Image (cartoon, helix red, strand yellow):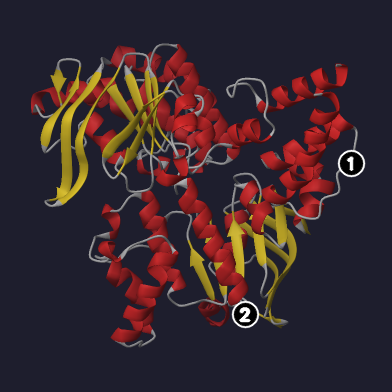
Amino acid sequence: MLTFNQVHFYYKKGHSIIEDMSFTVHPGEFVAIVGANGCGKSTIAKLMNGLALPKQGTVKWNALDTSNQSELADIRRQIGYIFQNPEDQLITTTVRDEVLFGLENIAVPRTEMDQRVLEALQAVQMESYIDAEPHQLSGGQKQRVAIAAILAMRPHMIIFDEATSMLDPQGREQVLHIMHTLHQQGITIVHISHHMDEVLTAERVLLIDQGRLIFDGSPHSFFTDIAVADYQLQVPFAVRIHHQLQLAAPVATDWKEAIRRQWSINSNR
Amino acid sequence: MVYQLQQVSVRYQDHDVLQDIYCTIEAGKWISVIGQTGAGKSTLVQVLKGLVDVRKGEYLFNNQTVAKDAKGQIQVRPEIGYVFQYPEHQLFETTVAKELAFAPKQQRWTASEIKQRIEDILPQVGLSEDILELVPFQLSGGQKRRVALASVLMMNPQVLIVDEPIAGLDPVGRTALLQYLHQWQQQENRTVILVSHHLDDVAQYSDEVLLLHQGRLIGQYDPVTLFIEQSHLLEQSGLVLPESIQLLKLIEQCSGQKIEIDSCREHDILAKILPIWHRKEQTFG
Protein backbone atom coordinates (compact mmCIF):
# COMPACT_ATOMS: atom_id res chain seq x y z
CA MET A 1 0.00 0.00 0.00
CA LEU A 2 1.31 3.44 -0.92
CA THR A 3 0.23 6.39 1.23
CA PHE A 4 0.62 10.13 0.68
CA ASN A 5 -0.08 11.97 3.93
CA GLN A 6 -0.39 15.78 3.70
CA VAL A 7 2.50 15.97 1.26
CA HIS A 8 3.97 19.31 0.19
CA PHE A 9 6.72 19.68 -2.37
CA TYR A 10 8.55 22.51 -4.13
CA TYR A 11 11.76 22.86 -6.12
CA LYS A 12 12.12 26.54 -5.25
CA LYS A 13 10.73 27.98 -2.01
CA GLY A 14 7.55 29.91 -2.66
CA HIS A 15 6.82 27.97 -5.89
CA SER A 16 4.74 25.10 -4.59
CA ILE A 17 4.45 22.06 -6.90
CA ILE A 18 2.46 19.72 -4.64
CA GLU A 19 0.18 21.03 -1.89
CA ASP A 20 -1.29 19.14 1.03
CA MET A 21 -1.82 15.94 -0.92
CA SER A 22 -3.22 12.82 0.74
CA PHE A 23 -4.32 9.57 -0.89
CA THR A 24 -3.70 5.84 -0.74
CA VAL A 25 -3.05 3.41 -3.56
CA HIS A 26 -4.16 -0.07 -2.53
CA PRO A 27 -2.40 -3.30 -3.55
CA GLY A 28 -3.44 -4.53 -6.99
CA GLU A 29 -5.17 -1.32 -8.06
CA PHE A 30 -4.90 0.24 -11.53
CA VAL A 31 -4.84 4.00 -10.94
CA ALA A 32 -4.69 6.66 -13.65
CA ILE A 33 -3.28 10.10 -12.79
CA VAL A 34 -4.42 12.91 -15.08
CA GLY A 35 -4.11 16.68 -15.29
CA ALA A 36 -2.77 19.54 -17.41
CA ASN A 37 0.91 19.90 -18.33
CA GLY A 38 2.87 21.14 -15.34
CA CYS A 39 0.16 20.28 -12.77
CA GLY A 40 2.53 18.04 -10.80
CA LYS A 41 1.80 14.52 -12.12
CA SER A 42 5.41 13.53 -12.74
CA THR A 43 6.44 15.05 -9.41
CA ILE A 44 3.88 12.81 -7.69
CA ALA A 45 5.37 9.83 -9.53
CA LYS A 46 8.87 10.81 -8.40
CA LEU A 47 7.65 11.26 -4.82
CA MET A 48 6.15 7.76 -4.97
CA ASN A 49 9.48 5.99 -5.32
CA GLY A 50 11.72 8.50 -3.59
CA LEU A 51 13.20 10.22 -6.65
CA ALA A 52 11.83 13.35 -4.98
CA LEU A 53 11.34 13.71 -1.24
CA PRO A 54 8.46 15.58 0.43
CA LYS A 55 9.27 18.95 2.03
CA GLN A 56 6.40 18.31 4.47
CA GLY A 57 4.25 15.25 5.14
CA THR A 58 5.13 11.64 4.42
CA VAL A 59 5.14 9.22 1.51
CA LYS A 60 5.07 5.63 2.71
CA TRP A 61 5.24 2.31 0.94
CA ASN A 62 3.71 -0.03 3.53
CA ALA A 63 5.86 0.69 6.62
CA LEU A 64 8.78 2.12 4.63
CA ASP A 65 9.20 5.91 4.52
CA THR A 66 10.79 7.57 1.46
CA SER A 67 12.29 10.24 3.74
CA ASN A 68 14.29 7.57 5.54
CA GLN A 69 17.47 7.19 3.45
CA SER A 70 18.11 3.63 4.69
CA GLU A 71 14.71 2.49 3.37
CA LEU A 72 14.95 4.04 -0.09
CA ALA A 73 16.71 1.12 -1.76
CA ASP A 74 13.98 -1.26 -0.60
CA ILE A 75 11.26 1.11 -1.80
CA ARG A 76 12.84 1.53 -5.23
CA ARG A 77 13.25 -2.22 -5.60
CA GLN A 78 9.54 -2.69 -4.98
CA ILE A 79 8.29 0.30 -6.98
CA GLY A 80 9.45 0.43 -10.59
CA TYR A 81 9.39 3.58 -12.69
CA ILE A 82 8.98 3.73 -16.48
CA PHE A 83 9.88 7.10 -17.99
CA GLN A 84 8.12 8.93 -20.82
CA ASN A 85 11.10 8.66 -23.13
CA PRO A 86 12.67 5.18 -23.13
CA GLU A 87 15.93 6.80 -24.31
CA ASP A 88 16.24 8.27 -20.79
CA GLN A 89 16.27 4.81 -19.29
CA LEU A 90 18.41 2.67 -21.62
CA ILE A 91 22.13 2.86 -20.96
CA THR A 92 23.85 -0.38 -22.00
CA THR A 93 24.83 -1.89 -25.35
CA THR A 94 22.64 -5.00 -25.40
CA VAL A 95 19.11 -5.80 -24.31
CA ARG A 96 20.46 -8.54 -22.00
CA ASP A 97 22.78 -6.07 -20.21
CA GLU A 98 19.96 -3.59 -19.91
CA VAL A 99 17.85 -6.06 -17.95
CA LEU A 100 20.87 -7.32 -15.99
CA PHE A 101 21.89 -3.83 -14.90
CA GLY A 102 19.21 -3.43 -12.23
CA LEU A 103 19.72 -6.96 -10.97
CA GLU A 104 23.42 -6.33 -10.47
CA ASN A 105 22.63 -3.15 -8.57
CA ILE A 106 20.37 -4.96 -6.13
CA ALA A 107 22.86 -7.83 -5.80
CA VAL A 108 20.71 -10.65 -7.11
CA PRO A 109 22.76 -13.90 -6.99
CA ARG A 110 24.46 -14.49 -10.35
CA THR A 111 22.91 -17.98 -10.60
CA GLU A 112 19.44 -16.43 -10.62
CA MET A 113 20.18 -13.65 -13.08
CA ASP A 114 19.87 -15.44 -16.43
CA GLN A 115 16.53 -16.93 -15.49
CA ARG A 116 15.17 -13.58 -14.31
CA VAL A 117 16.35 -11.82 -17.49
CA LEU A 118 14.71 -14.43 -19.68
CA GLU A 119 11.43 -14.39 -17.74
CA ALA A 120 11.26 -10.59 -17.83
CA LEU A 121 11.93 -10.44 -21.58
CA GLN A 122 9.37 -13.19 -22.20
CA ALA A 123 6.77 -11.19 -20.27
CA VAL A 124 7.14 -8.32 -22.75
CA GLN A 125 7.72 -10.64 -25.74
CA MET A 126 11.23 -9.35 -26.36
CA GLU A 127 13.21 -12.56 -25.66
CA SER A 128 14.23 -12.90 -29.32
CA TYR A 129 15.96 -9.49 -29.08
CA ILE A 130 18.13 -10.47 -26.10
CA ASP A 131 21.40 -9.79 -27.99
CA ALA A 132 20.11 -6.74 -29.91
CA GLU A 133 21.43 -3.23 -29.38
CA PRO A 134 18.74 -1.15 -27.61
CA HIS A 135 19.27 1.92 -29.81
CA GLN A 136 18.35 -0.09 -32.92
CA LEU A 137 14.90 -0.97 -31.59
CA SER A 138 11.66 0.90 -32.32
CA GLY A 139 10.19 3.20 -29.65
CA GLY A 140 7.67 0.56 -28.56
CA GLN A 141 10.36 -2.13 -28.36
CA LYS A 142 12.64 0.16 -26.34
CA GLN A 143 9.82 0.84 -23.92
CA ARG A 144 9.19 -2.92 -23.58
CA VAL A 145 12.87 -3.45 -22.75
CA ALA A 146 12.64 -0.70 -20.13
CA ILE A 147 9.62 -2.51 -18.65
CA ALA A 148 11.52 -5.84 -18.69
CA ALA A 149 14.40 -4.20 -16.79
CA ILE A 150 11.91 -3.21 -14.10
CA LEU A 151 10.05 -6.55 -14.13
CA ALA A 152 13.27 -8.49 -13.57
CA MET A 153 13.48 -6.82 -10.15
CA ARG A 154 10.04 -8.29 -9.37
CA PRO A 155 8.35 -5.05 -8.28
CA HIS A 156 5.00 -4.88 -6.49
CA MET A 157 4.05 -1.64 -8.17
CA ILE A 158 5.02 0.02 -11.47
CA ILE A 159 4.61 3.71 -12.29
CA PHE A 160 4.21 4.44 -16.02
CA ASP A 161 4.98 8.16 -16.36
CA GLU A 162 3.42 9.04 -19.75
CA ALA A 163 5.14 5.89 -20.96
CA THR A 164 2.89 5.67 -24.04
CA SER A 165 3.01 9.31 -25.14
CA MET A 166 5.97 9.05 -27.50
CA LEU A 167 5.01 5.74 -29.07
CA ASP A 168 3.26 5.08 -32.37
CA PRO A 169 -0.20 3.46 -32.10
CA GLN A 170 1.23 -0.05 -32.37
CA GLY A 171 3.88 0.57 -29.71
CA ARG A 172 1.26 2.17 -27.50
CA GLU A 173 -1.07 -0.80 -27.92
CA GLN A 174 1.74 -3.22 -26.99
CA VAL A 175 2.67 -1.30 -23.82
CA LEU A 176 -0.99 -0.97 -22.76
CA HIS A 177 -1.50 -4.69 -23.24
CA ILE A 178 1.52 -5.43 -21.05
CA MET A 179 0.28 -2.97 -18.43
CA HIS A 180 -3.09 -4.72 -18.20
CA THR A 181 -1.52 -8.20 -18.18
CA LEU A 182 0.75 -7.19 -15.28
CA HIS A 183 -2.26 -5.76 -13.46
CA GLN A 184 -4.10 -9.06 -13.88
CA GLN A 185 -1.07 -10.78 -12.36
CA GLY A 186 -1.51 -8.64 -9.24
CA ILE A 187 1.00 -5.84 -9.81
CA THR A 188 -0.25 -2.40 -8.76
CA ILE A 189 -0.22 -0.03 -11.73
CA VAL A 190 -0.02 3.77 -11.64
CA HIS A 191 -0.51 5.16 -15.13
CA ILE A 192 0.05 8.84 -15.90
CA SER A 193 -1.46 9.69 -19.26
CA HIS A 194 -3.01 12.36 -21.46
CA HIS A 195 -4.77 9.70 -23.54
CA MET A 196 -8.27 9.78 -22.13
CA ASP A 197 -9.21 6.50 -23.82
CA GLU A 198 -6.49 4.85 -21.70
CA VAL A 199 -7.98 6.44 -18.58
CA LEU A 200 -11.31 4.75 -19.36
CA THR A 201 -9.70 1.35 -18.77
CA ALA A 202 -8.33 2.24 -15.30
CA GLU A 203 -10.11 1.29 -12.05
CA ARG A 204 -9.64 4.68 -10.45
CA VAL A 205 -8.74 8.20 -11.60
CA LEU A 206 -6.86 10.88 -9.65
CA LEU A 207 -7.21 14.38 -11.16
CA ILE A 208 -4.48 16.85 -10.25
CA ASP A 209 -4.77 20.60 -10.71
CA GLN A 210 -2.03 23.03 -9.73
CA GLY A 211 -0.51 20.55 -7.32
CA ARG A 212 -3.75 19.64 -5.60
CA LEU A 213 -5.85 16.48 -5.73
CA ILE A 214 -9.20 17.57 -7.20
CA PHE A 215 -10.94 14.27 -7.88
CA ASP A 216 -10.53 10.64 -6.78
CA GLY A 217 -13.06 8.20 -8.24
CA SER A 218 -14.08 5.87 -11.05
CA PRO A 219 -13.51 6.74 -14.73
CA HIS A 220 -17.28 6.73 -15.29
CA SER A 221 -17.88 9.29 -12.57
CA PHE A 222 -14.84 11.28 -13.74
CA PHE A 223 -16.21 11.76 -17.24
CA THR A 224 -19.78 12.26 -15.96
CA ASP A 225 -19.29 14.53 -12.95
CA ILE A 226 -16.21 16.58 -13.87
CA ALA A 227 -16.03 19.33 -16.51
CA VAL A 228 -12.82 17.82 -17.81
CA ALA A 229 -12.15 20.65 -20.29
CA ASP A 230 -11.65 22.98 -17.30
CA TYR A 231 -8.55 20.91 -16.55
CA GLN A 232 -7.17 20.90 -20.12
CA LEU A 233 -8.53 17.39 -20.68
CA GLN A 234 -10.96 16.00 -23.20
CA VAL A 235 -13.78 13.51 -23.10
CA PRO A 236 -12.62 10.45 -25.09
CA PHE A 237 -14.16 9.74 -28.49
CA ALA A 238 -15.95 6.64 -27.15
CA VAL A 239 -17.75 8.69 -24.47
CA ARG A 240 -18.57 11.54 -26.90
CA ILE A 241 -20.12 9.06 -29.31
CA HIS A 242 -22.11 7.37 -26.57
CA HIS A 243 -23.59 10.75 -25.64
CA GLN A 244 -24.10 12.09 -29.17
CA LEU A 245 -25.76 8.93 -30.45
CA GLN A 246 -27.52 8.33 -27.12
CA LEU A 247 -26.39 4.72 -27.05
CA ALA A 248 -28.25 2.54 -24.58
CA ALA A 249 -25.19 0.41 -23.72
CA PRO A 250 -22.91 1.39 -20.80
CA VAL A 251 -20.04 3.71 -21.74
CA ALA A 252 -17.53 0.96 -20.97
CA THR A 253 -18.94 -1.06 -23.90
CA ASP A 254 -16.98 -1.00 -27.15
CA TRP A 255 -18.66 1.85 -29.08
CA LYS A 256 -18.63 -0.03 -32.39
CA GLU A 257 -20.34 -3.01 -30.83
CA ALA A 258 -22.88 -0.69 -29.12
CA ILE A 259 -23.72 1.00 -32.45
CA ARG A 260 -24.12 -2.31 -34.30
CA ARG A 261 -26.37 -3.66 -31.56
CA GLN A 262 -28.57 -0.58 -31.36
CA TRP A 263 -28.89 -0.31 -35.14
CA SER A 264 -29.83 -3.96 -35.34
CA ILE A 265 -32.40 -3.71 -32.49
CA ASN A 266 -34.02 -0.69 -34.15
CA SER A 267 -34.13 -2.45 -37.51
CA ASN A 268 -35.86 -5.50 -36.04
CA ARG A 269 -38.57 -3.60 -34.14
CA MET B 1 8.57 28.69 -52.92
CA VAL B 2 8.66 25.07 -53.99
CA TYR B 3 10.74 22.25 -52.55
CA GLN B 4 11.07 19.11 -54.64
CA LEU B 5 12.69 15.75 -54.06
CA GLN B 6 13.40 13.73 -57.19
CA GLN B 7 14.28 10.06 -56.83
CA VAL B 8 15.91 10.76 -53.48
CA SER B 9 17.43 7.86 -51.54
CA VAL B 10 19.11 7.95 -48.14
CA ARG B 11 21.13 5.14 -46.61
CA TYR B 12 22.26 4.73 -42.99
CA GLN B 13 25.09 2.20 -42.74
CA ASP B 14 23.82 -0.66 -44.95
CA HIS B 15 20.13 0.16 -44.63
CA ASP B 16 18.07 2.18 -47.14
CA VAL B 17 15.98 4.52 -45.02
CA LEU B 18 14.43 6.34 -47.99
CA GLN B 19 14.17 4.94 -51.49
CA ASP B 20 13.36 6.80 -54.72
CA ILE B 21 11.27 9.55 -53.17
CA TYR B 22 9.51 12.00 -55.48
CA CYS B 23 7.51 14.74 -53.81
CA THR B 24 6.68 18.43 -54.11
CA ILE B 25 6.13 20.76 -51.17
CA GLU B 26 4.40 23.97 -52.24
CA ALA B 27 4.33 27.13 -50.17
CA GLY B 28 1.27 28.01 -48.13
CA LYS B 29 0.10 24.45 -47.49
CA TRP B 30 -0.20 22.22 -44.44
CA ILE B 31 1.45 18.98 -45.36
CA SER B 32 1.49 15.98 -43.06
CA VAL B 33 3.92 13.09 -43.21
CA ILE B 34 2.58 9.80 -41.86
CA GLY B 35 3.73 6.19 -41.61
CA GLN B 36 4.67 3.59 -39.02
CA THR B 37 7.76 3.95 -36.84
CA GLY B 38 10.78 3.35 -39.10
CA ALA B 39 8.90 4.35 -42.28
CA GLY B 40 11.36 7.20 -42.90
CA LYS B 41 9.22 10.18 -41.81
CA SER B 42 11.85 11.97 -39.72
CA THR B 43 14.55 11.29 -42.32
CA LEU B 44 12.38 12.79 -45.06
CA VAL B 45 11.90 16.06 -43.19
CA GLN B 46 15.59 16.11 -42.23
CA VAL B 47 16.43 15.91 -45.94
CA LEU B 48 14.17 18.93 -46.55
CA LYS B 49 15.95 20.84 -43.77
CA GLY B 50 19.33 19.89 -45.25
CA LEU B 51 20.38 17.88 -42.19
CA VAL B 52 20.90 14.57 -43.99
CA ASP B 53 23.12 13.69 -46.94
CA VAL B 54 21.25 12.41 -49.95
CA ARG B 55 22.88 9.28 -51.43
CA LYS B 56 21.05 9.43 -54.72
CA GLY B 57 18.61 11.79 -56.43
CA GLU B 58 18.14 15.53 -56.44
CA TYR B 59 16.81 18.14 -54.04
CA LEU B 60 15.42 21.21 -55.80
CA PHE B 61 14.51 24.55 -54.24
CA ASN B 62 12.52 26.82 -56.59
CA ASN B 63 13.55 24.54 -59.48
CA GLN B 64 17.28 24.99 -58.72
CA THR B 65 19.32 22.02 -57.56
CA VAL B 66 20.43 22.33 -53.96
CA ALA B 67 24.14 21.50 -53.80
CA LYS B 68 25.00 18.48 -51.67
CA ASP B 69 27.60 20.48 -49.74
CA ALA B 70 27.45 23.02 -46.91
CA LYS B 71 26.69 25.79 -49.40
CA GLY B 72 23.51 24.01 -50.48
CA GLN B 73 22.47 23.43 -46.90
CA ILE B 74 22.94 27.11 -46.11
CA GLN B 75 20.71 27.89 -49.09
CA VAL B 76 17.69 26.01 -47.71
CA ARG B 77 18.17 26.02 -43.94
CA PRO B 78 17.42 29.63 -42.96
CA GLU B 79 13.92 29.53 -44.44
CA ILE B 80 13.00 26.34 -42.62
CA GLY B 81 12.29 26.13 -38.89
CA TYR B 82 12.58 22.67 -37.40
CA VAL B 83 11.11 21.53 -34.09
CA PHE B 84 12.66 18.21 -33.16
CA GLN B 85 10.75 15.19 -31.89
CA TYR B 86 12.54 15.38 -28.53
CA PRO B 87 12.76 18.96 -27.20
CA GLU B 88 15.87 17.97 -25.22
CA HIS B 89 17.66 17.76 -28.58
CA GLN B 90 17.32 21.47 -29.17
CA LEU B 91 17.15 23.18 -25.78
CA PHE B 92 20.55 24.19 -24.44
CA GLU B 93 20.38 27.61 -22.77
CA THR B 94 20.28 28.21 -19.02
CA THR B 95 16.94 30.04 -18.98
CA VAL B 96 13.83 30.01 -21.14
CA ALA B 97 14.34 33.72 -21.92
CA LYS B 98 17.88 33.05 -23.23
CA GLU B 99 16.61 30.07 -25.21
CA LEU B 100 14.00 32.20 -26.96
CA ALA B 101 16.42 35.06 -27.57
CA PHE B 102 19.22 32.91 -28.98
CA ALA B 103 18.35 32.94 -32.71
CA PRO B 104 17.14 36.59 -32.81
CA LYS B 105 20.41 37.68 -31.16
CA GLN B 106 22.37 35.94 -33.91
CA GLN B 107 20.33 38.02 -36.36
CA ARG B 108 21.16 41.17 -34.35
CA TRP B 109 17.62 41.94 -33.22
CA THR B 110 17.41 44.69 -30.59
CA ALA B 111 16.51 43.83 -26.99
CA SER B 112 13.12 45.52 -27.35
CA GLU B 113 12.35 43.61 -30.57
CA ILE B 114 13.18 40.34 -28.82
CA LYS B 115 11.08 41.27 -25.79
CA GLN B 116 8.10 42.19 -27.96
CA ARG B 117 8.32 38.97 -29.97
CA ILE B 118 8.55 36.87 -26.79
CA GLU B 119 5.46 38.60 -25.41
CA ASP B 120 3.59 37.83 -28.66
CA ILE B 121 4.65 34.20 -28.97
CA LEU B 122 4.45 32.89 -25.39
CA PRO B 123 0.66 33.02 -24.96
CA GLN B 124 0.17 31.55 -28.44
CA VAL B 125 1.99 28.37 -27.42
CA GLY B 126 0.26 28.22 -24.04
CA LEU B 127 3.05 29.57 -21.83
CA SER B 128 3.13 32.45 -19.38
CA GLU B 129 5.98 34.89 -18.73
CA ASP B 130 6.45 33.31 -15.28
CA ILE B 131 8.63 30.64 -16.83
CA LEU B 132 11.08 32.99 -18.57
CA GLU B 133 13.70 32.80 -15.83
CA LEU B 134 13.33 29.05 -15.24
CA VAL B 135 15.86 26.50 -16.47
CA PRO B 136 14.33 24.74 -19.53
CA PHE B 137 15.30 21.31 -18.20
CA GLN B 138 13.29 21.84 -14.99
CA LEU B 139 10.08 22.22 -16.98
CA SER B 140 7.54 19.44 -17.52
CA GLY B 141 7.72 17.47 -20.78
CA GLY B 142 4.83 19.42 -22.28
CA GLN B 143 6.29 22.79 -21.27
CA LYS B 144 9.69 21.90 -22.79
CA ARG B 145 7.95 21.04 -26.03
CA ARG B 146 6.17 24.41 -26.06
CA VAL B 147 9.42 26.27 -25.37
CA ALA B 148 11.13 24.41 -28.25
CA LEU B 149 8.29 25.40 -30.58
CA ALA B 150 8.29 29.01 -29.35
CA SER B 151 12.04 29.29 -29.93
CA VAL B 152 11.57 28.30 -33.58
CA LEU B 153 8.51 30.51 -34.08
CA MET B 154 10.50 33.51 -32.80
CA MET B 155 12.04 33.77 -36.29
CA ASN B 156 8.67 33.42 -38.08
CA PRO B 157 10.10 30.89 -40.58
CA GLN B 158 8.68 30.46 -44.09
CA VAL B 159 8.44 26.72 -43.56
CA LEU B 160 7.88 25.08 -40.19
CA ILE B 161 8.72 21.41 -39.75
CA VAL B 162 7.23 19.94 -36.58
CA ASP B 163 8.14 16.35 -35.76
CA GLU B 164 5.52 14.90 -33.37
CA PRO B 165 4.89 18.29 -31.75
CA ILE B 166 2.03 17.26 -29.51
CA ALA B 167 3.40 14.10 -27.85
CA GLY B 168 3.01 14.62 -24.12
CA LEU B 169 0.76 17.67 -24.35
CA ASP B 170 -2.53 17.70 -22.49
CA PRO B 171 -5.53 17.34 -24.85
CA VAL B 172 -6.83 20.91 -24.69
CA GLY B 173 -3.30 22.30 -24.95
CA ARG B 174 -2.69 20.03 -27.92
CA THR B 175 -5.82 21.26 -29.74
CA ALA B 176 -5.02 24.90 -28.92
CA LEU B 177 -1.47 24.55 -30.18
CA LEU B 178 -2.50 22.94 -33.45
CA GLN B 179 -5.22 25.53 -33.94
CA TYR B 180 -2.68 28.29 -33.39
CA LEU B 181 -0.26 26.74 -35.88
CA HIS B 182 -3.09 26.40 -38.40
CA GLN B 183 -4.11 30.02 -37.92
CA TRP B 184 -0.45 31.16 -38.19
CA GLN B 185 0.02 29.10 -41.34
CA GLN B 186 -3.12 30.55 -42.96
CA GLN B 187 -2.66 34.18 -41.92
CA GLU B 188 1.03 34.39 -42.73
CA ASN B 189 0.74 32.11 -45.76
CA ARG B 190 3.36 29.81 -44.26
CA THR B 191 4.04 26.15 -44.93
CA VAL B 192 3.69 23.61 -42.15
CA ILE B 193 5.14 20.12 -42.47
CA LEU B 194 3.75 17.98 -39.66
CA VAL B 195 5.14 14.54 -38.81
CA SER B 196 2.57 12.75 -36.70
CA HIS B 197 1.16 9.43 -35.55
CA HIS B 198 -2.10 11.18 -34.65
CA LEU B 199 -4.12 10.62 -37.79
CA ASP B 200 -7.13 12.43 -36.36
CA ASP B 201 -5.01 15.62 -36.28
CA VAL B 202 -3.68 14.88 -39.75
CA ALA B 203 -7.26 14.47 -41.04
CA GLN B 204 -8.28 17.69 -39.31
CA TYR B 205 -5.64 20.10 -40.59
CA SER B 206 -3.85 18.81 -43.70
CA ASP B 207 -4.09 20.08 -47.25
CA GLU B 208 -1.96 17.14 -48.38
CA VAL B 209 -0.69 13.94 -46.79
CA LEU B 210 2.52 12.09 -47.65
CA LEU B 211 2.17 8.38 -46.81
CA LEU B 212 5.43 6.51 -46.27
CA HIS B 213 5.92 2.79 -45.80
CA GLN B 214 9.27 1.08 -45.28
CA GLY B 215 11.22 3.99 -46.75
CA ARG B 216 9.05 4.36 -49.86
CA LEU B 217 6.51 7.07 -50.60
CA ILE B 218 3.18 5.35 -51.24
CA GLY B 219 1.71 8.64 -52.44
CA GLN B 220 0.84 12.29 -51.85
CA TYR B 221 -2.91 12.70 -51.35
CA ASP B 222 -5.56 15.14 -50.24
CA PRO B 223 -7.13 13.90 -46.96
CA VAL B 224 -10.50 12.87 -48.43
CA THR B 225 -8.85 10.74 -51.10
CA LEU B 226 -6.55 9.03 -48.62
CA PHE B 227 -8.81 8.61 -45.58
CA ILE B 228 -12.10 7.91 -47.36
CA GLU B 229 -11.48 6.62 -50.88
CA GLN B 230 -8.07 4.96 -50.50
CA SER B 231 -8.23 4.02 -46.83
CA HIS B 232 -7.00 0.50 -47.63
CA LEU B 233 -3.56 2.10 -48.26
CA LEU B 234 -3.42 3.13 -44.61
CA GLU B 235 -4.32 -0.36 -43.46
CA GLN B 236 -1.71 -1.85 -45.81
CA SER B 237 0.83 0.52 -44.27
CA GLY B 238 -0.04 -0.70 -40.77
CA LEU B 239 -1.92 2.47 -39.76
CA VAL B 240 -5.30 2.78 -38.08
CA LEU B 241 -8.01 5.12 -39.41
CA PRO B 242 -9.09 8.05 -37.21
CA GLU B 243 -12.01 7.04 -35.00
CA SER B 244 -14.40 9.50 -36.66
CA ILE B 245 -13.75 7.87 -40.03
CA GLN B 246 -14.14 4.41 -38.51
CA LEU B 247 -17.52 5.65 -37.26
CA LEU B 248 -18.44 6.92 -40.73
CA LYS B 249 -17.58 3.57 -42.29
CA LEU B 250 -19.53 1.69 -39.62
CA ILE B 251 -22.66 3.79 -40.20
CA GLU B 252 -22.28 3.26 -43.97
CA GLN B 253 -22.03 -0.48 -43.30
CA CYS B 254 -25.09 -0.53 -41.00
CA SER B 255 -27.23 1.64 -43.27
CA GLY B 256 -26.03 0.25 -46.60
CA GLN B 257 -25.85 3.90 -47.64
CA LYS B 258 -22.83 5.72 -49.11
CA ILE B 259 -22.28 8.97 -47.20
CA GLU B 260 -20.70 11.71 -49.34
CA ILE B 261 -17.92 13.50 -47.48
CA ASP B 262 -15.92 16.54 -48.56
CA SER B 263 -13.98 17.06 -45.33
CA CYS B 264 -12.24 14.67 -42.94
CA ARG B 265 -12.74 16.92 -39.90
CA GLU B 266 -14.52 15.14 -37.05
CA HIS B 267 -17.06 17.94 -36.72
CA ASP B 268 -18.01 17.72 -40.43
CA ILE B 269 -18.24 13.94 -40.37
CA LEU B 270 -20.53 13.97 -37.32
CA ALA B 271 -22.71 16.57 -39.05
CA LYS B 272 -23.29 14.04 -41.86
CA ILE B 273 -23.76 11.02 -39.62
CA LEU B 274 -26.06 12.36 -36.89
CA PRO B 275 -29.09 13.04 -39.14
CA ILE B 276 -28.90 9.50 -40.56
CA TRP B 277 -28.65 8.03 -37.06
CA HIS B 278 -31.50 10.13 -35.67
CA ARG B 279 -33.77 9.41 -38.69
CA LYS B 280 -33.26 5.75 -37.95
CA GLU B 281 -34.14 6.32 -34.28
CA GLN B 282 -37.32 8.22 -35.21
CA THR B 283 -38.41 5.66 -37.77
CA PHE B 284 -38.15 2.73 -35.40
CA GLY B 285 -37.86 4.38 -31.98
Q: Chain of mark 2?
A: B
Up/down of B158 relative to B221, above or below: below
**Residue at image coords 10%, 35%:** A56
Residue A16 shown left or right of residue B66 in the figure: left
Q: Residues within 10 Å of mark 2 (few under 14, many from 20)?
A: some
Up/down of A6 relative to A135, above or below: above
Q: Are marks 1 and 2 in contact (CB under 8 Å)?
A: no
Mark 1 or 2: the one toward you: 1
The quadrant where residue B206 appears: bottom right
Residue A61 shown left or right of residue B257 in the figure: left
- Which corner quadrant holds the N terminus of chain B? bottom right
**Which dot marks residue B258?**
1
**Which dot marks residue B67?**
2
Q: Residues within 10 Å of mark 1 (few under 14, many from 20)?
A: few
Residue B235 appears in the rendering: no
Q: Nearer the viewer, residue A204 or A151?
A: A204
State the separation of the CA atoms marked 1 and 2.
50 Å
**Residue at image coords 81%, 55%:** B262
